[in-house]
Image (cartoon, rainbow, N blue to C red):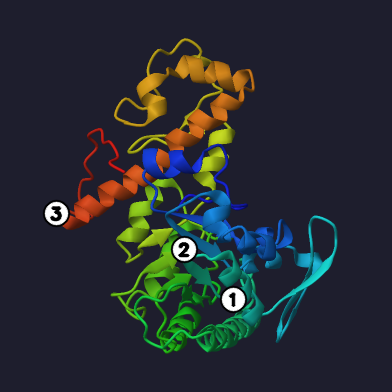
């Protein structure tokens, strides 16, 4: 899922993201939209779909990760978390119930529960306490969600709610968390607390720890991962959905992802007169139209067009990789060879 933190995937229009690049869903951030411009305004403007003119699916996270990353500006309590705005220092409170209400006002298609995301390296005692709190908060969030008229076992609620498996880097804790969250009979399940500084093999292990517990007939979402060549590693471990800021963030910094190859740092002098596209096997607009030399020139000149073109390429590379993985699944060739012939998108 391309990340549109503030209701916008940086550098791209909704038309480019959906019709040209073929994204089916984007992610937006509850914490940031709650602080600015506020869920009340967005609700009056037709929800987030109407506000950003996006007619496909939207997933919003609960804002928990952003709140917990504030460290010195938040206080965790059993009822929720107090925090200060990074914008103006104003004080706010998120509870499991209030984050559901905010996301309902945003009108997102998939909502996430409030969870506690411990830092990498926490001790076993803190990890267990945070996991227990995450489970309690999920139970409260689901009780509140269902009090709004959602039936238990509804396979297709208008706004789905996913609980989040936590447990730090402890496989037993994660398995226990998953078992208890499965009792909620949720429309889908997320795995959080990864990409927080742990070695990548450990991230894979934590995903594998709950693969046989989370329902295989429901979508599984691993939050905040990963590098381009890691996507297939998560899929073969039973993952259906992922998000990551790397395609857009790295694009703005001159970093191009290449399917099946090493990334390109366009600032390097050797590309100054390179007539080749970024990736000769890529079907994106950037690679069909421009040379490495031109892109390096735009980057050096700090032209806004560079960020647009680089973002088009990187988002395409990620989405196209997922298209190829889906095809490999359909033909029974995963985790075998992924077809690298150029592709195009049919809206």
Point out the tag, 1 or 3, that comes first from the N-terminus: 1
Q: CA distance from mark 1 to mark 3?
A: 39 Å
Name the residue that disc number 2 marks: 203
Determine which of the numbered discs, if any, sits on residue 100 in the image.
Answer: 1
Occupied quadrant, residue 305: top right
Q: Are marks 3 and 2 in contact (CB under 8 Å)?
A: no
Q: Of the residues under marks 1 and 2, which one precedes in the sequence?
A: 1
Q: Residue at x 14, y 57 (%)?
A: 332
Position of residue 42 measured from the top left corner of the image (x, y, whole percent): 63, 60
**In the image, which disc is placed on residue 231?**
none
Q: Residue at x 56, y 23 (%)?
A: 267
Of residues 306 and 270, which is closer to you in this image?
Answer: 306
Q: Is residue 52 above or below residue 85?
A: above
- Kindly identify which residue carries mark 3: 331
Percent position of residue 311, x then y? 50, 36
Q: Is residue 96 left or right of residue 228?
A: right
Residue 175: horizontal and vertical position, in percent?
A: 43, 82
How far apart marks 3 and 2 lie (CA) works out to 28 Å
Image-based side of 199 in relation to 97, left or right = left
Residue 111 or 105: which is nearer the viewer?
105
């Amino acid at each position: 899922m391309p990340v549109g933190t503030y209701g916008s995937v940086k550098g791209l229009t909704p038309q480019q993201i959906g019709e040209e690049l073929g994204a089916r869903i984007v992610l937006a951030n509850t914490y940031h939209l709650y602080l600015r411009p506020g869920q009340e305004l967005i609700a009056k403007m037709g929800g987030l779909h109407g506000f950003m003119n996006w007619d496909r699916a939207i997933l919003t996270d609960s804002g928990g990760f952003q709140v917990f990353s504030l460290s010195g500006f938040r206080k965790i309590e059993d009822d929720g978390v107090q925090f200060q705005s990074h914008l103006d220092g104003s004080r706010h409170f998120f509870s499991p119930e209030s984050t559901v209400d905010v996301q309902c006002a945003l009108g997102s298609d998939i909502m996430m529960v409030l969870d506690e995301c411990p830092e990498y390296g926490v001790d076993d005692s803190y990890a267990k306490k945070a996991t227990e709190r995450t489970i309690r908060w999920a139970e409260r969030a689901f009780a509140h969600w269902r009090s709004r008229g959602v039936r238990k076992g509804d396979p297709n609620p208008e706004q789905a709610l996913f609980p989040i498996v936590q447990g730090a880097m402890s496989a037993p804790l994660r398995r226990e968390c998953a078992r208890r969250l499965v009792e909620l009979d949720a429309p889908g399940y997320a795995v959080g607390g990864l990409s927080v500084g742990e070695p990548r093999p450990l991230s894979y292990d934590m995903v594998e720890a709950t693969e046989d517990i989370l329902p295989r007939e429901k979508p599984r979402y691993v939050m905040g991962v990963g590098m381009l060549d890691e996507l297939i590693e998560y899929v073969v471990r039973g993952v259906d959905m992922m998000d990551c800021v790397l395609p857009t963030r790295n694009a703005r910094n001159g970093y191009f992802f290449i399917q099946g190859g090493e990334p390109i740092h366009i600032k390097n002098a050797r590309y100054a007169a390179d007539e080749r596209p970024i990736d000769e096997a890529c079907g994106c607009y950037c690679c069909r139209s421009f040379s490495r030399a031109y892109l390096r020139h735009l980057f050096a000149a700090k032209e806004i067009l560079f960020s647009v073109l680089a973002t088009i390429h990187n988002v395409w590379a990620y989405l196209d990789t997922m298209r190829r993985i889906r095809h490999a699944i359909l033909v029974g060739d995963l985790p075998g060879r992924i077809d690298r012939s150029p592709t195009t998108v049919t809206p």
